Amino acid sequence: MTRILVPEGLLAEILSQARKPHALNEAGGLLLGLRKDNAVHVIRLTLPKPWDRATPVLFERSARGHRFAALRAWKASLGKVDWVGEWHTHPFGTANPSFTDQKSWRRLANHVKRPMAFIIAGRTDIFVGVQDPGSRDVRRLRSVEIDETYRLFG
């Protein structure tokens, strides 16, 4: 079972994107981190870019900007930091993944042939899950351990 370790500061940043007082549209970006056996350690995220497409019920990440940030992180880490997932917000609803989210996640995990982490922030809750390649359903993870710096989901 894949576990995900996320710094509290990154979770706070994602939640702040969903809770902006005048947020009319979804926001999102990439999750960048390290993979080890059955664990993913998220260490960075990308923030929304001007080229992304966002509506109140949709976020489509543009490769432009996000890809460069991922490539820079990969090069700076000598190939250790990888694209490990994506995040987005549901500013007008719960953090439950939509049918569109789940379909996109299946396609993505099958394309990269590795488990991918996904985070959705709603106004009042957060969803953290893993999509395994070849699996139909995303696996919702629960917070299993928290300290002042990190939160572990499993």
Image (cartoon, rainbow, N blue to C red):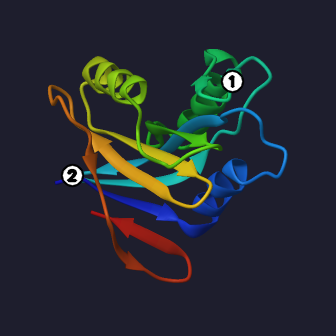
Q: Residues within 10 Å of mark 1 (few under 14, many from 20)?
A: few
Q: Would you name the residue on which mark 2 appears?
A: 37
Q: Residue at x 48, y 83 (%)?
A: 147
| 53, 63: nearer the viewer | 53
The kind of secondary structure element at disc 1 is strand
Q: Quadrant of residue 27?
A: top right
Q: Earlier in the sequence, mark 1 or mark 2?
A: 2
- Residue 55 marker: 1
Q: Quadrant of residue 26?
A: top right
Residue found at the far front of this picture:
93
Q: Quadrant of residue 65?
A: top right
Identify which amino acid the numbered label 1 is placed on: Thr
Residue found at the far bottom of this picture:
147
Expressed as whole percent of the image width and height from the top left, the position of residue 108 reads 35, 22
Identify which amino acid the numbered label 2 is placed on: Asp
Q: Is residue 60 left or right of residue 97?
A: right
